[in-house]
Amino acid sequence: MHPQTLRLYERRGLVIPKRHGKNRLYSQHDIERLMYIQNLTQELGINLAGVERIIRLQNELDQLKIQKEEEIRRISERIAQLERMKRAREDEIEDIRSRLRDELSQPEAEEHEDRVECHDWPATNARRLE
């Protein structure tokens, strides 16, 4: 690739090489981008304005992808948290049901052993109501 072409791409912001004195140091990413630009311009006939737009849209798409992946990760974590909470509540419900079954299966005499018999309750309480 001609040095003037590289400088043009740099001026247009298509590549941003590091500098060491007057020398430009192109990273592997820069080289891949230059090859991509060359493919777009020479093989597909896209002008630099089109290349700039394509690269800008790809960058936006990459950013959206990163954002959505992060959002999916947060949602997945929340779903896992809610599923753990659901299992805990289900375990609590099952424990309550089990205790209730145990209590209901005990003989009725045991249930009422703490009750006091009061055969004269209506007469006793009728006086209080007056």
Image: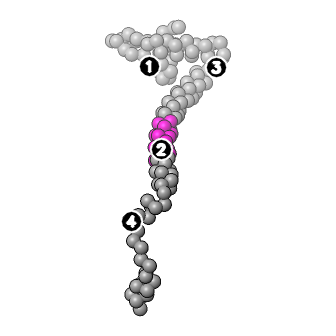
Q: CA distance from mark 3 to mark 4?
A: 93 Å
First to last magenta residue range: 75-92
Q: Which mark is residue 114?
A: 4
Residue 40 image point, x, y percent: 61, 17
Please name which of the two marks, 3 or 4, marks the residue nearer to the observer: 4
Residue at point 49% right, 33% down?
73
Q: Is residue 83 visible?
A: yes
Of the two numbered discs 4 and 1 on the same chain, state the one appearing first in sequence.
1
Residue identifier under label 3: 46
- Marks 3 and 2, Cα distance to the nearest angstrom? 63 Å
Q: Which residue is mark 1?
A: 16
In this rendering, which labeled residue sits more in front, label 2 or label 4? 4
Q: Is residue 113 above or below residue 9?
A: below
**72 versus 104 height, above or below:** above
Residue 39 or residue 23, whichever sits in front? 39
Q: Earlier in the sequence, mark 2 or mark 4?
A: 2
Secondary element type, mark 2: helix
Residue placed most toward the observer, 63 or 124:
124
> Residue 36 lies in magenta, yes or no?
no
Mark 4 touches mark 1? (CB < 8 Å) = no
Name the kind of residue labelled 2 in the image: Asp
The 10 Å Cα crowd at callout 3, few under 14, some 14 to 19, many 20 or more, is some
Q: Main secondary structure of the magenta part?
A: helix
At 43% across and 12% down in the image, what residue appears?
26
- Three-letter amino acid code at the position of disc 3: Ile
Observer-side mark, 1 or 2, equals 2
Which of pointers 3 and 1 lies earlier in the amino acid sequence?
A: 1
Disc 2 crowd, CA 10 A, few/some/many (<14, 14-19, 20+): few
Horizontal side, residue 44 vs residue 116: left or right: right
Tag 3 near tag 4, CB within 8 Å:
no
